[in-house]
Amino acid sequence: MFGTSGIRGVVGKDITVELALNIGAAVGEESEKLTIGRDTRTTGETLENAVAAGALSTGSKIETLGIVPTPTTARYADDKALEITASHNPSEYNGFKPFNTDGTAFNQDQRKRVEKAVKKGEINYSKEFNDEIKIEDALNSHKSEILKSVKEIENTKVVVDGGCGAASEITPKLLADMGCEVITLNCQKDGRFPGRLPEPTEENLKDLKKIVKDTDADLGIAHDGDGDRTAAIDEKGNYVEADKLLCLFAIHEKAEEVVAPVNTSSVIEHVTEVRRTKVGDVRVAQELKENGGKLGGEPSNTWIFPEQTYCPDGVLAAAKLCEIAEEGKISEKISNLPNYSVRRKNFKCEDGRKKEVMEKFKEESKNMGKITTLDGVRVDTENGWFLVRPSGTEPYIRATSEAKDKKRADKLLDMVEETLSRIL
Ligand code: MG
């Protein structure tokens, strides 16, 4: 039921009011007080009411924040938090993402307990029934916390593409308060996502790229549906690759080391030391919490600044991007970084065979280079690396290769393909 990023699915099929009620009750059992927020999806309010009813029926206190980004909910909570969101998925999806007060997502034990309670109906209903407290100023509180930590801006014009998601109000207001000249795009909150799909990929940001250029802006910023992701467009209207954006953040934060997953580009190694984790922003947050660190990031455009919260905070990332743009042209900063070629390919593989295929692949790649098995099999060769890992959610084995030289990246992926085809 639980992925690392919570529970997500199509509403009416996987996500029902009954499930919301049970999740509310199960998470309520874990909480003294549950803070609930939601993104802009049209199904959000109904699911919120069901989650709230479930949590209240276990005797937990609750407070509801209305439509706010995931990091707003995580930061506002003083006990447990739950955001009703399907993040970057299209409008027909929704889901539940529970957090602890430090911004970390529920860990494996907590997820297991909630899952067990929901599946077996093992919930202790209470006769005590608290009032729902509606909070009106969560966005203001999030904004003022960030304003305390950022610099004043004098010369930056920024276009914010909220994607009609939960951060559509707070990010433009925050950046304007910092002193930026702000132009908004898709910043009307609308859970049908009429402007673009919620995932801030290069393909989905064509309008933003054009408007940044047409208005001579210094920077474009785009969020996903729940505002924990932030992508950037430079002043020339070019999409900034997330791996390079991580480099800009690392330089800006003067981070001597960053925490990033095993599939992050080697470009970061030209800027700072890297401590690698399994794939997923939840793993990055866990590593930062357990072993410290100043900055974490993931190539999905998820950024973690643990001094403020372990929850990826796209709004804070947007503010920091304006600070970076204020110091000089983003395109010039990017052009100082080396270029790598990346190749990616998915191979069909049923869930039941994944383990055996990975074992065999590991055996066969023994002589190709230095093997790491942090998540899947990563092989570092003299000039380039490849990573082969089973997808956690889909019937695929995913392969990535990277090298400075395009031909070498092709060759590495060809080697992977040849080996995998033989095994599969
Ligand atoms: Mg998200």
Image (tube, rainbow, N blue to C red):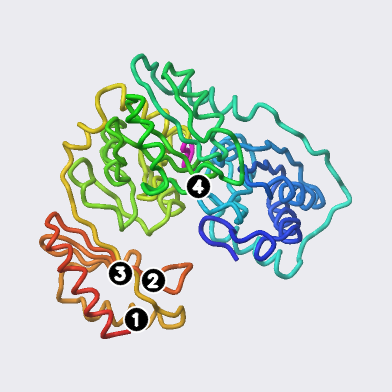
The residue lying at 57 percent from left, 61 percent from top is 109
Which residue in the structure is indicated by mark 2?
390
SS at badge 3: strand
* Label 2, label 3: how far apart the Cα atoms are: 7 Å
Q: Is residue 257 above or below residue 394?
A: above
- Mark 3 close to ligand 1, CB under 8 Å: no
Determine if the C-beta at disc 1 is less than 8 A from ligand 1: no
Task: Determine whether 216 is above or below 373 in the image.
Answer: above
Query: Which mark identifies residue 357?
Result: 1
Q: Residues within 10 Å of mark 3 (few under 14, many from 20)?
A: many
Q: Earlier in the sequence, mark 4 or mark 2?
A: 4
Proximity of marks 1 and 2: CB atoms separated by less than 8 Å: yes
Q: Are marks 1 and 3 in contact (CB under 8 Å)?
A: no
Q: Earlier in the sequence, mark 1 or mark 4?
A: 4
Residue range of the region highlighted in magenta in the rendering: 309-314
Label 2: state its secondary structure. Answer: strand
- The residue identified by callout 4 is 198
Q: Are marks 2 and 3 in contact (CB under 8 Å)?
A: no
Three-letter code, disc 1: Val
- Callout 1: helix, strand or loop? helix
